[in-house]
Amino acid sequence: MSETEQPANPSPSPAAAKPAAAPTPTHSSAPESVIVRPWPKVVFLYPTFIVATIFFLLSWLELEAVSSVTLGNIFMGVFFMNLLVFSFDFSRIKSITILIGVIAAVLLVLWIDSKWEVTNFLSRVLESIEISMNTGFYGFLSAGMGFLLLLVFINTRFNYYEVNAREILHHHGYLGDIRRWSTEGLEMNKEIYDIAEYILLRSGRLIFQPATSKKAIVLDNVPNVSRIEKATNDLLSHVAVRINQRPGPG
């Protein structure tokens, strides 16, 4: 009896016929878009607002441990220090110069005090300053500044910039107006021109220069400017890599 002929192309085994598993898609950590909200300079008055609110509560509770003169002197000190942010731009060079000047002044006073006891005179002058405000003053200032900061916050919800993979969008107006610039050939720069503002809100300036526009987009007082710059760089660099790795036709 002759042996049965085997087929030339045997059917594949079930294991071989099983289709290969699809590759697991990878999710990029780059954001889809970055929101940039420039704020007006009045936002840097928030330390005065916080102190006024706390002192209103302390004055309203009438705590015997804290006198109205102590609260008044501290409040005026904080208020005038806060006004310095609006008076000058504390650049790096200017800040270092002021710091050196303050250290030199302190050393000079200590040297003079060793001969003429100047510190005792200055202490008597400071102790003679008695500034007192009532509960109504702190309450009115706190409420007024709180309302103003609330209006500023609401306005930033309607006036902001959005950077995505293809374009920069300026959302402005309460009816949803939008202006657009392409991100192709976009140049971006970050400037921290005021050390005091950077300390208060880590804010700075972002400058966008679209290739299709002759005028740069300058955004001042951007909080957390370093974080926003990094997120924007990650977004735009991710888009560039994705475009460069796109397979060609065929």
Image: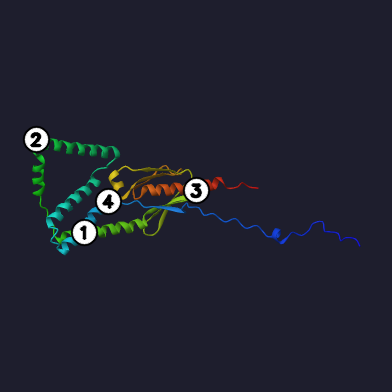
For disc 1, the neighbor class at 10 Å (few under 14, some 14 to 19, many from 20) is some
Report the mark closest to the observer, 2 or 3: 2
Identity, as a three-letter code, of the amino acid under mark 3: His
For disc 3, the neighbor class at 10 Å (few under 14, some 14 to 19, many from 20) is some
- Residue under pointer 2: 115
Report the mark closest to the observer, 1 or 3: 1
Closer to the chain start, of discs 1 and 3, is: 1
Looking at the rendering, which quadrant does residue 112 occupy? top left
Identity, as a three-letter code, of the amino acid under mark 4: Phe
- Residue 182 visible in rendering: no
In the rendered structure, the answer to whether residue 156 lies left or right of residue 166 reads left
Looking at the rendering, which quadrant does residue 72 occupy? bottom left
Looking at the rendering, which quadrant does residue 12 occupy? bottom right
Report the mark closest to the observer, 1 or 2: 2
- Residue under pointer 3: 238
Q: Point out which mark residue 44 bears.
A: 4
Q: Residue 101: where, in percent of width, then height?
A: 21, 37
Identity, as a three-letter code, of the amino acid under mark 1: Ile
| Cα separation between marks 1 and 2 | 42 Å
